[in-house]
C-alpha cells in the first residue's frame, strides 16, 4: 500500500493528516515535497478548484476537482490531464493547507472537527 492510500485510509477514518507528496503534476499549487494538510471532507460540498484526496479507478490522487455533475466528481491534475470521474464516497479529504498557508474556500467543507486539527 502506497503513502497516498495510507493517508486516504486515515482521513476516511476521521483524522486530519500532514504529509509531503512527491511529483510535479500539481505545480504550482503543490510542489514536490511541500507539506500538505488534508482533513476529512463532506464530498457533497466539494467544488471545482478544490484539491482533494480521492480514489479514481483504483488509484489515489491528491488532485483538483475539475467538474461536479450528476452525483459524480471529476479529478484532474494541474497540467490538464483528467484522471477520471469518481463517486462522492471515494472523495476522502480536502487539502486545507500547503506549507502552512491555508487553502481558499475550505470553510464549511471539513467534517469531524476543524481544519487545523
Image (cartoon, rainbow, N blue to C red):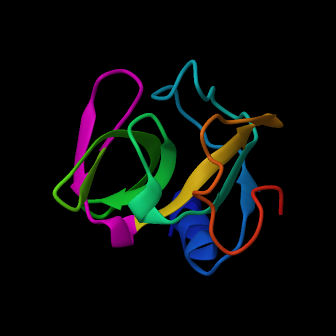
- Left/right placement of residue 65 relative to residue 101 reads left
- Left/right placement of residue 83 relative to residue 93 reads left
Magenta stretch holds residue 86: yes
Direction left: furthest residue: 70
Q: Is residue 78 above or below residue 113?
A: above
Q: Which residues are magenta?
A: 75-90
Q: Is residue 15 above or below residue 106?
A: below
What residue do we see at 67% from left, 36% from top? 103
The image quadrant that residue 21 belongs to is top right
Q: Position of residue 19 (x, y in %)?
A: 72, 51
Q: Position of residue 93 (x, y in %)?
A: 55, 60
Q: Is residue 15 above or below residue 107?
A: below
The image quadrant that residue 80 belongs to is top left
What residue do we see at 45% from left, 41% from top? 63
**Foreground of the two, 4 or 40:** 40
- Left/right placement of residue 93 relative to residue 89 reads right
**Foreground of the two, 63 or 109:** 109
What residue do we see at 83% from left, 63% from top? 117
What residue do we see at 65% from left, 77% from top? 14
**Foreground of the two, 33 or 14:** 14
Q: Position of residue 32 (x, y in %)?
A: 63, 30
The image quadrant that residue 48 belongs to is top left
Q: How many marks?
A: 0
Amino acid at each position: 500500500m502506497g503513502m497516498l492510500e495510507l493517508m486516504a485510509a486515515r482521513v476516511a477514518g476521521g483524522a486530519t493528516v500532514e504529509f509531503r507528496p512527491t511529483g510535479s503534476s500539481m505545480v504550482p499549487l503543490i510542489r514536490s515535497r511541500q507539506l500538505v494538510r488534508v482533513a476529512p471532507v463532506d464530498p457533497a460540498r466539494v467544488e471545482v478548484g478544490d484539491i482533494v484526496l480521492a480514489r479514481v479507478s483504483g488509484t489515489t490522487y491528491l488532485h483538483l476537482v475539475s467538474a461536479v455533475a450528476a452525483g459524480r466528481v471529476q479529478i484532474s491534475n494541474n497540467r490538464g490531464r483528467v484522471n477520471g470521474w469518481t463517486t462522492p464516497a471515494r472523495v476522502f479529504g480536502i487539502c486545507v493547507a500547503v506549507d502552512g498557508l491555508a487553502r481558499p474556500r475550505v470553510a464549511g467543507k471539513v467534517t469531524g472537527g476543524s481544519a487545523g486539527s
